[in-house]
Image: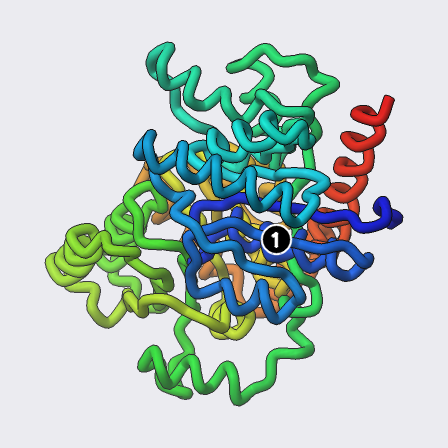
Amino acid sequence: MTLPPNFTLLQVVPELETGGAEQTTIDVAHAVVRVGGKALVATRGGRMASRLEADGGRLAQMPVQTKNPLVMLGNAARLVDLIRKEKVSIVHARSRAPAFSALWAAQATKTPFVATYHGVYNANNSLKRWYNAVMTRGDLVIANSDYTRDHVLNEHQIDPARIVSIPRGIDLERFNPSWVTPDRVEALRAAWGIAPSDRRVKLLLAGRLTRIKGHLLIVEAAARLKAEGREDFLMIFAGDDQGRTDYRLEILASIAAAGLKDQILVVGHCDDMPAAYQVCDIAMLPTTKPESFGRTAVEPQVMGKPVLASDHGGTTETVLNGETGWLVKVSDAEAWACAIAKAVDLGPGRLAAMGQAAANRARRLYSVDAMCQATLESYERVLEARAT
């Protein structure tokens, strides 16, 4: 990939704590540095900032997560100074609130502006639709799936030539079963209190503790399985509550009320997701609202694990029903109980075969290298269009 000499990318993202948009920010920054460019990220900061800097990126700390109009104006001024000082080539916004400041700064400095639509944003009135549309006001819109691209076209009626679909990428080196040592897996099992002798089928629901991820739906499905006398499964909820203490307590209370403390573990944030997928046999993504892409449906497939996912949104592109996993009726506890039972009953050999099919497909379609190459090609396209 050839970028212009002295190419400098400025990405703007609310924070670098955890999540798909944040990981993509890190990945693209690393790709820019690798081809000889400079990569800046304007953000409030977070636990992933050290990874950005370790990869050769630079942090520009400012309160871009705010929705306060006065602070947003201040951020725009800070970004103008940064763009001029660092001779930024392209500004790339990855969230709506900071996109306003980033767009204003890009316009003030006549710098190309790109935005990634990382989610399918609800808009039940014209004001919200206007707010969401900030992501479409630049030179190019990147959608993280075909599902998201279709939504943007339907919602905002922009020129189809100004939007490109680039699926999120998975780091195939990090998510490689061959690199996950047994001691990492055993350390995680011990931390989660899973005995070495536990032979139950293990199902992992990875993702932040938020209602739309479907934790309570899975508790209800598990309760139905238990009522049928099944105790051959262990479910693991791995994710940070990010301050949603009430929801975490609601999950724990529902588990206790259903008598599922021995069947469902709530283990908090996990730093070693490749090992987490090796601990489990099956991954779950029971989202109650459509995910625009659903990284946690693709990562386990790359690791050779079949996936149970809600039958909507981006997961209908990333999970092949009956081949690499199962697509399950949305928000239907009975359907989820049946699907889980069907998956558990397959047995180790057939689960492994399905997991291998999943790995082959996911590694071909969803590598971080492919995502970064397509993103850098989009930057080239924008720069060439501006030049002419």
Q: Nearer the viewer, residue 75 or 123?
A: 75
Q: Residue at x 38, y 81 (%)?
A: 198
Whether 372 is drawn above or below 315: the answer is below
Q: Nearer the viewer, residue 220 or 47?
A: 47
Whether 146 is drawn above or below 199: the answer is above
Q: Secondary structure at mark 1?
A: strand
Q: How far across and how far down the image is residue 76, in percent?
A: 48, 35
Q: How far across and how far down the image is residue 192, in percent?
A: 34, 78
Q: Which residue is under mark 1?
A: 40
Q: Residue at x 15, y 52 (%)?
A: 246
Q: Residue at x 70, y 45 (%)?
A: 87
Question: How many numbered marks appear?
Answer: 1
Q: Nearer the viewer, residue 357 or 48?
A: 48
Residue 275 visible in the displayed image: yes
Q: Horizontal placement of 312 versus 7: left or right?
A: left
Q: Nearer the viewer, residue 31 or 19?
A: 31
Q: How far across and how far down the image is residue 77, in percent?
A: 48, 37
Whether 274 is drawn above or below 252: the answer is below
Amino acid type at circle 1 is: Leu
Q: Residue at x 86, y 21 (%)?
A: 388
Q: How far across and how far down the image is residue 209, in percent?
A: 31, 53
Residue 354 visible in the displayed image: no
Colouring of the image? rainbow
Q: Residues within 10 Å of mark 1 (few under 14, many from 20)?
A: many
